[in-house]
Structures are given as C-alpha cells and as structure tokens.
Image (tube, grey):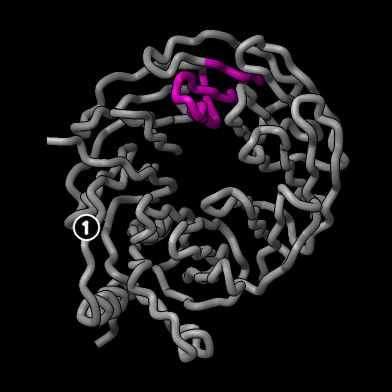
C-alpha cells in the first residue's frame, strides 16, 4: 500500500511525541490562508484548528496589536480588525490596493505602501483613519519601520526615508535594484539588500549616506535578525549557506555558514538560540545553533515551507507549507544536542502537523485573552 506524504509525516510525529511530552503555548497562531480568503486560528495549547475567520479576499499579513490583530487583504486595500475573541470586528479601506503594512513599535500608527497609487500611507492604529499620504517616486518594493519615528521604502533603484511625525523625506540612489530592507534595532542604520548585485548596503539614518557596501555570495532575498538583533542572517539564491553580519561592529560579513539546501525564509529563537532555515526549493528546515554555528537538525516538514514563526517562549517553531496547506510544528526544547546529532544531523523531529487551509502564507502568534 502506497503511503501519502501527509500519512508519513503523521507517523513521524507520533514517534516523536512518544519520546517526549510537551506543554503548549497559551495563545493562538493566526494564519493567513490566502487560498481560503480567511484567517485560520490554531489553539497552541491543544494544537488544533479552532476557527476560520472569513475576510472576503486573500489575506497576506497578520499583525498583533495589543488586544486585537490587523489583517491585510492587498487586493482590496483593506485592513481587517480581528478582536481577542477571534471575531472580525471591522474593516477599513486604505487604498485601492495595499502591498504591505507595518505597525510602529509604539503601536500608535500603521504604515502602509500602495503599489498602484505609489504612496506611503500613515494611519492611526486604533481608528485606522488615514493621517497622511505621501507620494513615492516609483512603485514600492519593500517597507520597514524603525524604533525611532522613521519608515523606509525601497523603490526599484532607490530608497526613500520618511520621518513619520513631520513628514520630512530623504532619498538615496542605490548601486543596484533595492529589495528587502531592515533598520538596525537602534534606528540609526538602514540595511538595504540588492539581490541583482549580490550585495548589502548600510545607510546612515536620516541622511542616507552610504556607510558600507558588503559583497555577498548569494542574492540577499531573506533578512533575519537574531533575538537580540545583534546578528543579521542573510540567505538567497546562489549559495547553500547563510551569511552572518554584525551590524553594530565593523560592518563586514563575519562568516558564511552552510545551512541546508537552497536556504530561504528564516526565523530565530531566543533561548535556545537556534536559526531555522527553510529550503526554498525543497521540503525541509535546517536548524543551526547560533552559538556554535553548527547544523543540529534537518527536519522534513511537508512540500514547500514558505514562512516560519517562533513562539515568544521559544518552545515551538511553526512552519507553514504553501502546497500542502499544513502547519508543521517543531518542539524546540525537545531538540537533542548530542555528538550523534551533530554528526548525523538528526537531533530534531516534528512535534505535530496541523491542516490549516489552502495556501497559508504568513502567521502571527497572539496570547489568549485573560479569563
């Protein structure tokens, strides 16, 4: 009898669960299932799907915001409010189409970019009323916000920086096509990826003067800070490795570490300090010990892992599989670090696999309301 991939994964999960017990996390994983036009809510105490929240269009992002969550449906240009009881409380349209949203660290404002109208939108986080619209010089590619009141947008061959209080703006031309970007934790440096040039550029904030240009062995498509934001991990096409950069020290590529096959999206746990790296073209997740820089596990998670989230207590890594419609769960504190695990890369296994709906693309972890 031929066994399906999901059945094989289930057997692997049962074997892993038999070896160890685990307590859940007191919260929910809210998962944007774009093939269902809904948000899937998974109870992380019982690890089961408890609700599908209809949002009427394909969702692309879920952002926790105090006692509620904000859901973006790009095609309608709308932000939906999901309350603590997992109900869609309201919907607010920001533009014809919105490609990305971010919540400022003080949770007072929502920042959005609209590709069609080429604008940056600042809205009040509580009412979602638009405060300001500012035109961009080209179609936006990526967005990030800083702990200081700044937002940065990559627009093709340039980067535009906005002071969110005053509306003042700066612009810098890039040597190549600007892609993903990230502010350093103190907001004083902006790191801009250029996939076409295989490089990363560090710009001073707010003047956008170039501080350093770092050549890379791969196209920098995925940028991920570790838990204390003291290290930046970079992955992308061109190398089966992850580049490690220390943004507070001398700006250079400190080390390039082999990390599975065709590294893609990443996420980092705090304690233990592990980096989870999904294969872009494969079906596994590679686990790297951040301190030793060694691979301690390679776990089969389905068909096409596209997003990884880690629970705030660093107990579980949640991996979304776009093709199978599942969420695979790795029990982080159950990973065995032994000489055998280092040698055979078998120190981790799946904890469970949960069907969540068609085409899951992004997830957020929110606490359960206090009773």
- Residue positioned most to the front: 249
In-front residue for pair 32/65: 65
Q: Residues within 10 Å of mark 1 (few under 14, many from 20)?
A: some
| Residue 331 location (% of width, % of height) | 33, 67
User: Horizontal placement of 303 versus 163: left or right?
Assistant: left
- Residue positioned most to the left: 371
User: Horizontal placement of 16 versus 225: left or right?
Assistant: left
| Residue 162 location (% of width, % of height) | 68, 20
| Residue 151 location (% of width, % of height) | 63, 26
| Residue 183 location (% of width, % of height) | 65, 37
Q: Is residue 352 above or below residue 360?
A: below
Q: Which residue is at a point 24% across and 49% down the rendered structure image? A: 42
Q: Bounds of the magenta span? A: 96-122
User: Horizontal placement of 95 versus 302: left or right?
Assistant: right
109 magenta-colored: yes
- The image quarter containing residue 10 is bottom left
- The image quarter containing residue 115 is top right
Q: How many marks?
A: 1
| Image quadrant where one finds the C terminus | top left
Q: Which residue is at a point 86% across and 37% down the rendered structure image? A: 210
111 magenta-colored: yes
Q: Which residue is mark 1?
A: 47
- The image quarter containing residue 62 is top left
Kindly tell me whether residue 56 is visible in this rendering. Answer: no
Q: Which residue is at a point 52% across and 85% down the rendered structure image? A: 342
| Image quadrant where one finds the N terminus | bottom left
Q: Which residue is at a point 48% across and 69% down the rendered structure image? A: 285
Q: Is residue 148 above or below residue 37?
A: above
Instruction: Indicate the secondary structure of the residue bearing disc 1.
Output: loop
In-front residue for pair 278/200: 200
Kindly tell me whether residue 209 is visible in this rendering. Answer: yes
Q: Is residue 61 above or below residue 104?
A: below
């Amino acid at each position: 009898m031929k066994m399906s991939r999901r059945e094989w994964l289930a057997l692997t999960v049962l074997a892993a669960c038999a070896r160890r017990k685990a307590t859940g996390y007191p919260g929910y994983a809210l998962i944007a299932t774009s093939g269902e036009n809904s948000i899937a809510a998974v109870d992380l105490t019982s690890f089961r799907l408890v609700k599908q929240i209809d949002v009427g269009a394909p969702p692309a992002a879920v952002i926790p915001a105090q006692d509620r969550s904000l859901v973006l449906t790009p095609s309608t240009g709308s932000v939906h409010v999901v309350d603590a009881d997992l109900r869609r409380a309201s919907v607010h349209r920001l533009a014809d189409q919105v490609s990305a949203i971010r919540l400022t660290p003080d949770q007072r404002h929502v920042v959005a970019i609209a590709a069609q109208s080429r604008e940056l939108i600042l809205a009040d986080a509580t009412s979602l009323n638009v405060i300001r619209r500012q035109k961009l010089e080209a179609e936006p590619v990526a967005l990030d916000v800083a702990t200081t009141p700044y937002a940065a947008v990559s627009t093709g061959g340039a980067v535009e920086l906005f002071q969110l209080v005053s509306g003042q703006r700066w612009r810098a031309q890039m040597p190549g096509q600007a892609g993903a970007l990230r502010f350093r934790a103190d907001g004083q440096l902006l790191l801009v990826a250029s996939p076409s040039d295989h490089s990363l550029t560090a710009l001073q904030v707010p003047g956008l003067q170039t501080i350093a240009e770092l050549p890379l062995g791969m196209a920098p498509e995925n940028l991920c800070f570790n838990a204390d934001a003291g290290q930046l991990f970079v992955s992308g096409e061109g190398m089966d490795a992850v580049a490690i950069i220390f943004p507070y020290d001398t700006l250079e590529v400190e080390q390039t570490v082999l990390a599975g096959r065709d590294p893609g999206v990443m996420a980092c746990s705090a304690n233990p300090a592990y980096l989870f790296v999904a294969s872009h073209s494969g079906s596994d997740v590679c686990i790297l010990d951040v301190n030793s820089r060694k691979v301690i596990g390679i776990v089969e998670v389905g068909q096409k892992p596209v997003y990884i989230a880690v629970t705030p207590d660093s107990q579980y890594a949640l991996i979304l599989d776009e093709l199978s419609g599942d969420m695979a769960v790795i029990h982080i504190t159950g990973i065995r670090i032994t000489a055998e695990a280092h040698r055979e890369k078998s120190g981790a296994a799946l904890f469970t696999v949960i069907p969540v709906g068609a085409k899951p693309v992004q997830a957020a972890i929110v606490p359960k309301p206090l009773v």
